[in-house]
Amino acid sequence: MNSACVLVSGGIESAVLVNDALGRYDRVTPVYVRNHLRWEDTELVCLKNFLRGLKQNNLKPLVILDLNMRDVYDNHWSITGIHTPGSKSQDSSVYLPGRNIVLLAKTAVYASMKGITSIEIGILRGNPFPDSTKPFLKKMSEVLSAGLNHKLEVKAPFQKMRKEDVIALGKKLPLESTFSCLNPKGYEHCGECNKCVERKKAFFAAGVFDKTRYKKAGI
């Protein structure tokens, strides 16, 4: 069957990507790779709530894989919460070294064992990180296919789109159930971190009312 794994977090891009993939594949398996970062408990709750709202028969149950990165990231803000990138920080400040390498490697092993040949990831236009480029994804597809002796293609269907474009595409979905915060306050967005501000600006640019609950409103 025509099937794919879709890498999911709690965020807008991967949520809309899962829904979009349901129209293109016979079977779609959402895959969450847990790295034990400080926002993941909240992210997973939001992700599960979102997926429950998708009623299509070709959506397979959420797969949660584990690849602990706490020993590598150590004193990084993604573990400690200290100096979390704020509203005025540059996009480069939210870079997690090797993030997509780790996510794709673990998912590729799972896909190969299940006979799945496509992995989709919600990378957007303008992503500045080295593990999000077209050449990287092409080479990663080749390396994973060779190393696993299983044909795999890593795809980024939203790579020509901006965040506001994805919001417009998914405006009929319950996007308020998605989660994009680096510094969660319980199960709410903080409203002040780099990702919260990016989210607010994208909803505004898309002309879509933002139903997200933020501890601190405004941009």
Image: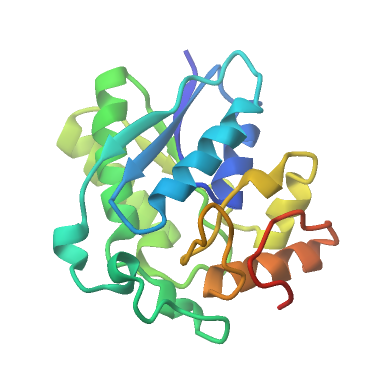
Reply above or below: 65 against 56.
Answer: below
Reply above or below: 136 against 194.
Answer: above
Residue 195 placement (x, y as % from top left): 55, 68
Picture quadrant of residue 96: bottom left
Q: Is residue 162 visible?
A: no
83 relative position to 48: left or right:
left
For image coordinates 29% across by 70% down, the residue present is 80
Reply above or below: 108 against 38.
Answer: above
Residue 150 placement (x, y as % from top left): 25, 27
Q: Can residue 119 be seen in this view?
A: yes
67 relative position to 198: left or right:
left
Q: Which residue is the extreme one toward the bottom?
A: 88
Reply above or below: 1 against 82.
Answer: above
Residue 73 placement (x, y as % from top left): 21, 66
Quarter of the image that includes the C terminus = bottom right
For image coordinates 49% across by 61% down, the residue present is 184
Residue 118 placement (x, y as % from top left): 42, 32
For image coordinates 85% across by 61% down, the residue present is 207
